[in-house]
Amino acid sequence: MFKYFLIFISFSIFSPTILAEQQFVCRTKQFIVIIDYLPSRDLLRYRSWNKPKRIQTRPSLELYGNPVNTSYSEGTGVCRYTTWNFTKRNFRYVVEEESPCGETPPKITGTLSVYENGNLILTQSCVK
């Protein structure tokens, strides 16, 4: 029994979720989206939960992408912001941070957009 407990503890410590580096959290009226980086696999991960599900549960959607192809930054210095793109079949999920130098309301932190076959089907603001 003790052996299995040690195996569980070891797995928990080295789990990719535990070692993930959080990049961005987007909370919209319908979704919670977390983008993080998994250094052990050199991948970015997109996880989303349909509200009212909580992040302690299994995500409604989980996607992975190469950091070089999945994210890009724009702006310079304190005005720098990042956009992440993930695809699954004919859907593209785009999460964009708001530029800290923009004229967006202070509660807006970014935008979640979903495209199907290149057509925008959903866009929602990320809020604090």
Image: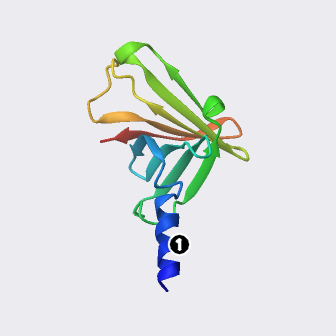
Q: Residue at x 42, y 19 (%)?
A: 80
* Above or below for 66 versus 40: above
What is the total number of numbered labels drawn onto the structure image?
Answer: 1
The residue sitting at 55% across, 42% down in the picture is: 39
In the image, is 108 to the left or to the right of 31? left
Residue, far bottom: 1
Q: For this rendering, which residue is in front, 52 or 117?
A: 52
Q: Residue furthest front?
A: 3
Q: Residue at x 48, y 73 (%)?
A: 6
Q: Residue at x 52, y 29 (%)?
A: 83
Please tell me whether residue 67 is drawn above or below residue 102 in the rendered image.
below
107 lies above or below 45: above
Residue 47 position, x and y percent, is 52, 51
Where is mark 1, residue-wise?
7
Q: Residues within 10 Å of mark 1 (few under 14, many from 20)?
A: few
Q: Position of residue 43 (x, y in %)?
A: 61, 42
Task: Where is residue 31? Give x, y as percent.
Answer: 44, 52
Looking at the figure, which quarter contains the C terminus?
top left
Q: Hey, what amino acid is under mark 1?
A: Ile
Task: Judge from the rendering whether residue 47 lies leftward or rightward of residue 77; answer left or right.
Answer: right
Residue 117: x %, y % from top left = 71, 39
